Image: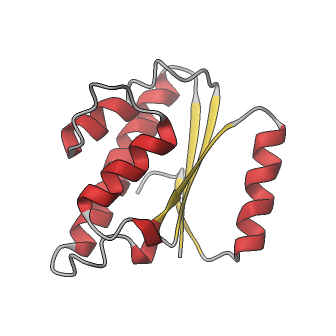
Amino acid sequence: MNQYVKRMALTYEEIYHKIWQESQTGVYVSYLRGKNCKTEDDFLHEVAASFQFPYYYGENWAAFDECIQDLEWLNFSRMFVVFDDFSKAFRDQPAIQNLLQDRIIEYWSRAIDYWASEGKAIEVWLNN
């Protein structure tokens, strides 16, 4: 796992305090709600809203991967992503829940590495 994708177990108060701290320094903050991501489609909608994906976003995994390594529509030098209630993500698809959660880690790890090569830092917290 990439060093910037971290599994956390924080309270809502701790998460919101961290989000507030980051936003005060000009960091682009994205908050994803695992409780709203019961299925793959739910996740793909949630992430599109949080990152303001462009109209051509295809709402599939390949498009998600492409968009998080593009992000030209966002002005950021540093990004902080919180996926809260991560353990609840994909709960309506229990047979592949772990696979889908692992896919998120894989795609974010690639994006983090890509953006690091561009001089931009992304930190991702998976909070349970």
Rendered position, 2 above or below 16: above
Q: Which of 45 and 81 is in front in this view?
A: 45
| 77 left or right, relative to 91 | right
Report how many numbered discs are placed on residues in the image: 0
Residue 98, horizontal then vertical, whole percent:
26, 73
Quadrant of res 10: bottom right
- The quarter in which the N terminus is drawn is bottom left
Q: Residue at (21%, 76%) from the top-left corner?
A: 93
Residue 68, horizontal then vertical, whole percent:
39, 34
Colour convention of the picture: secondary structure
Quadrant of res 121: top right
Q: Residue at (80%, 61%) from the top-left corner?
A: 17
Rendered position, 33 above or below 63: below
Q: Which residue lies furthest to the left in this view?
A: 95
Q: Nearer the viewer, residue 75 or 7?
A: 75
Q: Residue at (25%, 60%) from the top-left corner?
A: 40
Residue 59, horizontal then vertical, whole percent:
24, 42
Q: Nearer the viewer, residue 96 or 2?
A: 96
Rendered position, 55 above or below 95: above
Rendered position, 7 above or below 106: below
